[in-house]
């Protein structure tokens, strides 16, 4: 990203929160880099450099500020969320791709050359993929040290470091201090839960998000109550229930995690970010969609509307098939029956929710018809489960939108609507667009005769690359918590 130094400096002088996370200010006289909203005295322009991400600043020898916490910024540069290779690679890095393999492996998963991937990272971020991964680990570690009582050895493991020696070295290199100097909680104190804050870029229409998820909450697996979202999660043989709620007066969500799952805090936090679309840049998206004047009242009615993601791609895909040709309420009932018949209870949980969603291996040969599902759709779920079990469909692969749709359409029982809906929510594709949806065609006509699918596609060109967000705004304008499921 090319940053305009004068524009960045004006934002720093104004402490403008709209630019928080879009760039970082490094001060050459102190060796420190900060967020644009840092309360410290504003340095002179001749003494600053601007970077598009923390890793680029740290690769250039700057340390993060201990006052403004760069690791707590929303972290969504302008290009984030597009279908670009860099954006998809960042999603995989956030999910731990470089904790388990190298850049060559990451490039192979994405279908590009490693040299090309490194070049793109330098061009867009000013840092290498490995530098991004290390900075992410160190910043997660600092968050866990400050916000939780986890022992430092557990913090190192949770943050993705292979050893405490590497953890200590990386931490000192980034912050110039030992990890223990950032401890705020008494170490090793056992608690029922860990609580961690996750930042997002405001505005955030929490009410719309929780309404959408609540209407589709799978009985036994997830629930919405009193403005909180709760769901069961598992890591190997360990399972429990997490709780997510907004923090009053702050652009943060509070995530509560059972102590037993503390060593899996990183993938859990990443799952929450994905589910609640915390990396979205609502102002940039709204500004783009506002090029269509008829979208203006919808943007005003729901500022900060997000695309709800999915905790599990497989779970979401099964839920989408269950919802074909039935209402959202009917699909929710079927999903509850599926979990009751083929899911697994968590013995340690006595309250709702207390069931784990079935794994692909549980459903590939299951008699799903027994829950009252037509044979064709039961067969589609079994085929989906087999494809995931065999590795023919990988929800964690950084494929492009066209490839994702092609893979999904190759499975029996999945048509264009379902494929794009899965791409929107399970793969986080911001330009996925279920153009055959009847509600979308009506709402996009803005009071006129419903558009044809072809006409909707033409109009949707104006909304690209944010057509998934346009879809959510149009559904919200319909005033009903449902969408049109597949019609075949």
Image: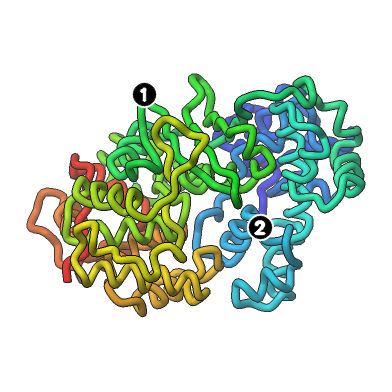
Q: Which residue is mark 2?
A: 93
Q: Is residue 163 above or below residue 74?
A: below
**Quarter of the image holding residue 9?**
top right
**Which residue is rendered at x = 19% and y = 56% of the image?**
484
State the residue lying farthest toward the left: 449
Q: Is residue 36 above or below residue 284?
A: above
Asked whether, in this view, residue 79 is left or right of residue 326, the answer is right
**Quarter of the image holding residue 87?**
bottom right
Where's the C terminus, which quadrant? Answer: bottom left
Q: Which numbered disc, 1 or 2, marks the residue that appears first in the sequence? A: 2
In percent of width and height, residue 210 lies at: 36, 35
Pointers 1 and 2 in contact (CB under 8 A)?
no
**Which residue is rendered at x = 58% and y = 46% of the image?**
270
Disc number placed over residue 284 in the picture, else none: none
Pick the front one: 69 or 239: 239
Q: Is residue 27 above or below residue 127?
A: above
Asked whether, in this view, residue 27 is left or right of residue 370, the answer is right
**Which residue is rendered at x = 50% and y = 59% of the image?**
82
**Which residue is rendered at x = 30% and y = 66% of the image?**
367
Pick the front one: 275 or 1: 275
Give the colouring mode of the picture: rainbow
In percent of width and height, residue 298 lies at: 27, 41
**Quarter of the image holding residue 171?**
top right
Q: Residues within 10 Å of mark 2 (few under 14, many from 20)?
A: many
Query: Can residue 74 be seen at all in this image of the molecule?
Result: yes
Query: Can residue 283 be seen at all in this image of the molecule?
Result: no
Q: Which residue is mark 1?
A: 226
Looking at the rendered image, the disc whose residue lies closer to the viewer, 1 or 2, is: 1
In percent of width and height, residue 148 lies at: 70, 28
In percent of width and height, residue 47 lies at: 84, 37
């Amino acid at each position: 990203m090319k940053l305009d130094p004068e524009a960045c400096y004006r934002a720093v002088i104004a402490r403008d929160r709209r630019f928080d996370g879009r760039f970082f200010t490094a001060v050459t006289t102190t060796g420190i880099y900060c967020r644009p909203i840092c309360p410290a005295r504003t340095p002179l322009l001749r003494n600053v450099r601007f970077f598009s991400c923390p890793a680029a600043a740290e690769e250039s020898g700057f340390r993060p500020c201990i006052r403004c916490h760069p690791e707590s910024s929303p972290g969504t540069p302008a290009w984030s969320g597009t279908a670009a290779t860099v954006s998809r690679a960042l999603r995989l890095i956030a999910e731990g791709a470089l904790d388990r393999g190298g850049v060559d492996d990451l490039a192979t998963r994405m279908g590009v050359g490693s040299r090309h991937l490194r070049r793109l990272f330098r061009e867009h971020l000013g840092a290498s993929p490995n530098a991004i991964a290390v900075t992410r680990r160190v910043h997660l570690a600092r968050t866990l040290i400050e916000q939780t009582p986890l022992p430092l050895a557990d913090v190192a493991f949770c943050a993705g470091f292979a050893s405490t020696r590497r953890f200590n070295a990386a931490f000192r290199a980034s912050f110039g201090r030992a990890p223990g100097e950032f401890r705020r909680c008494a170490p090793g104190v056992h608690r029922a839960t860990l609580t961690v804050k996750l930042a997002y870029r405001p505005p955030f229409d929490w009410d719309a998000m929780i309404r959408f998820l609540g209407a589709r909450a799978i009985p036994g697996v997830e629930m919405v109550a009193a403005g909180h979202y709760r769901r069961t999660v598992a890591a190997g043989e360990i399972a429990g229930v997490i709780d997510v709620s907004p923090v009053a007066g702050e652009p943060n969500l509070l995530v509560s995690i059972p102590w037993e799952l503390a060593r899996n805090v990183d993938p859990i936090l990443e799952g929450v970010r994905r589910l609640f679309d915390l990396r979205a840049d609502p102002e940039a998206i709204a500004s783009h969609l506002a090029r269509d004047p008829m979208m203006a009242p919808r943007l005003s009615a729901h500022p900060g509307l997000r695309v709800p993601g999915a905790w599990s791609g497989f779970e979401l895909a099964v839920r989408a098939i269950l919802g074909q040709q039935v209402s959202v309420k009917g699909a929710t009932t079927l999903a509850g029956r599926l979990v009751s018949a083929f899911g697994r209870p968590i013995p340690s949980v006595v309250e709702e929710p207390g069931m784990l969603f079935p794994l692909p291996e549980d459903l590939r040969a299951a008699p799903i018809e027994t829950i009252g599902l037509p044979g064709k759709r039961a067969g589609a779920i079994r085929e989906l489960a087999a494809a995931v079990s065999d590795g023919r469909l990988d929800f964690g692969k950084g494929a492009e939108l066209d490839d994702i749709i092609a893979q999904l359409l190759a499975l029996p029982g999945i048509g264009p609507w379902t494929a794009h809906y899965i791409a929107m929510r399970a793969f986080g594709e911001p330009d996925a667009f279920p153009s055959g949806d009847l509600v979308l065609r009506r709402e996009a006509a803005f009071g006129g005769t419903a558009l044809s699918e072809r006409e909707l596609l033409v109009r949707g060109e104006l909304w690209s690359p944010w057509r998934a967000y346009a879809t959510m705004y149009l559904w919200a304008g319909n005033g009903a918590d449902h969408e049109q499921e597949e019609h075949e």
